[in-house]
Image (cartoon, helix red, strand yellow):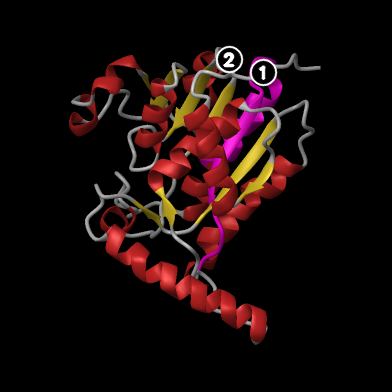
Amino acid sequence: MKILVLGGNGFVGSQICRKAIERGIEVVSLSRRGKATDKIAKEPWAKEVQWVAGSALDPPSFRSHLETCNGVIHSIGILLENNLNKFVSGSQASGAGLSYEQVNRDTALVVAREARRLPPVQSFVFVSAKSAPPFLQRYILAKRDVENELRTYGHDELRSAFLYAGMIYHESKPGSPQMASLLKIGSAVNETMLNYVGFGLSGVDEPTDLNTLAAAAVQASIDPNIEGIVDNQRMGMLATMAEEHPRDYPPTPERR
C-alpha cells in the first residue's frame, strides 16, 4: 500500500505521514521544498518518507509519483489570506499573496483530476472543515467546491472521503489545547441552541484532535468502505480501527 500526501511538511500533513509510516504504509510527500523541514527531519519516521519536489498545480511535476500510489491525502490549506495564517493555523505558508481558491481548492482538484485517470489510484481523502464563521465564507466555499466535484466521480473512478474537522489542536501548537477546551464548551452550547431554538453560530464546532484526524485520514485512504463525509465521531471510530488493526489493510480492488 502506498499513498501520496499533499502538504506532508505541514502541521496536519506531517502527522498523517507519521501515522501511515507507523502502520507500514509507503508514503510519498509532495511539496515545493522537496524535503522535510529541519524539525520534521529529526523525527525517526521521517527517514521512511519519500520526500519529492513538485507542485500540486503542475501535473507534469507529480504525475510520475502519483501513478505509483494507491491513494491521495490532501492536507494543503490556508485559513487566512495574509501573514497571520502561519501563526493562526500552524501552516508553513504565510498566506500573503495566496488565495483560498488557489490553495484550498485548485491544489486538490488538479491532483484529483489526474488521479481519476490513473488506474492504480483508488482513493482521495480531503481534509475539509465542518463549517466556518461568516468572515471565512470563501474559505469554506473553496472546500465545498472540491467536495462537490469529487462527488460527481463514480466510486470506481475515484472513491472520496471528506474529513469535516473543527479547529485542529495538538500540544505542539501553543495555545491550541486551551482553545480546544473552550470550543468544546462553546460547541455544546451551540448544539443546544440548534436543538431548542433552531439556530446557532456558524463556525463554533467541536474541535478535532490532530492525532485522531491523522489516523482517520490514513484509515479512510486504505479502507474501501469509507466514503463521503467523515465527522468527528466517525474519525474517532476510524482512529480506533487503525489502532486495533494497524497492519490490517483491506485488499485494493481493481479499477474498472
- Tell me the crowding category of disc 1: few under 14, some 14 to 19, or many 20 or more residues within 10 angstroms, Cα based: some
* Residue at far front of view: 244
What residue did someone put label 1 on? Answer: 118
Do tag 2 and tag 1 residues touch (Cβ < 8 Å)? yes
Percent across and percent down for residue 78 are: 41, 52
SS at mark 2?
loop
Percent across and percent down for residue 210 are: 39, 46
Residue 239 seen in the figure: yes
SS at mark 1?
loop
* Numbered range of the magenta stretch: 107-132
Percent across and percent down for residue 97 are: 36, 53
Quarter of the picture containing the C terminus is top right
* Residue at far bottom of view: 197
**Residue displayed at 54% across by 67% down:** 137
Mark 2 / mark 1, whichever is N-terminal: 2
- Tell me the crowding category of disc 2: few under 14, some 14 to 19, or many 20 or more residues within 10 angstroms, Cα based: some
The residue closer to the viewer here, 44 or 31, is 44
Identify the amino acid type marked 1.
Leu
